[in-house]
Image (cartoon, rainbow, N blue to C red):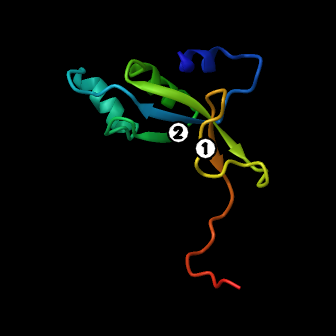
């Protein structure tokens, strides 16, 4: 799985942020797994949350690995080459975050 590949990767630096998506419902899951999913903020199917890659979060993710999909988050700082907002996933499965500031809604046009 993506989580195992991410954790086993010793050659490259591990991702600092993880995008976690709930793929399989918590219905008929043990109560402890339901509470773990709720603690991670995964309340509905296909909801994606972003967590820091810490030991405690990794432990929670390993507990519910049958229910989730984990992708590393790459923070793009180059404004010219960042995604347009419609393409959040790269070809290699990475999740991209755009760091561009949004334009204010009340900005006067020239």
Dividing the picture into quadrants, the one containing residue 53 is top right
Identify the image quadrant of residue 24: top left
**Contact flag, marks 2 and 1 (Cβ < 8 Å):** no
Using the rendered view, name the quadrant where residue 17 is placed. Answer: top right
Q: Residues within 10 Å of mark 2 (few under 14, many from 20)?
A: some
- Position of 40 relative to 32 (above/below): below
Question: In this view, which residue lies farthest toward the left?
Answer: 28
Mark 2 vs mark 1: give the one in front. 1
Report the number of discs. 2
> Which of 16 and 25 lies nearest the eye of the viewer?
25
51 versus 82 height, above or below: above
x, y percent for residue 47: 40, 40
Left or right for 103, reference 65: right
* Mark 1, secondary structure of its residue: loop
Q: Which residue is depicted at the point 72% across and 46% down?
A: 76
Above/below status of 96 relative to 4: below
Q: How far apart are marks 2 and 1 (CA)?
A: 20 Å
Residue at 62 percent across and 81 percent down: it is 107
Say above or below: 79 vs 75: below
Q: Which residue is denoted by mark 1 in the rendering?
A: 87
Q: What numbered label is drawn on residue 51?
A: 2
Which of the two residues, 5 or 60, is positioned nearer the viewer here? 5
Q: Where is residue 68 in the image (x, y as percent from the top left)?
A: 42, 26
Residue 56: image x %, image y %? 49, 29
Residue at the front extreme of this rendering: 110
90 with respect to 30 (left or right): right
Residue name at image x 32 percent, y 39 percent = 43
Q: Residue 49 carries which label?
A: none
The numbered mark, 2 or 1, whose residue comes first in the sequence reads 2
């Amino acid at each position: 799985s993506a989580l195992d590949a991410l954790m086993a990767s010793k050659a490259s630096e591990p991702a600092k942020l993880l995008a976690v998506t709930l793929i399989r419902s918590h219905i008929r899951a043990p109560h402890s797994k339901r509470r773990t999913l709720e603690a991670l903020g995964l309340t509905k199917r296909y909801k994606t949350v972003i967590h820091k890659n810490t030991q405690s979060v990794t432990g929670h993710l390993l507990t519910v690995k049958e229910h989730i999909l984990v992708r590393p988050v790459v923070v793009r700082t180059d404004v010219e080459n960042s995604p347009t907002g419609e393409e959040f996933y790269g070809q290699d499965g990475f999740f991209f975050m755009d760091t561009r500031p949004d334009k204010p809604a009340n900005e006067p046009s020239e």
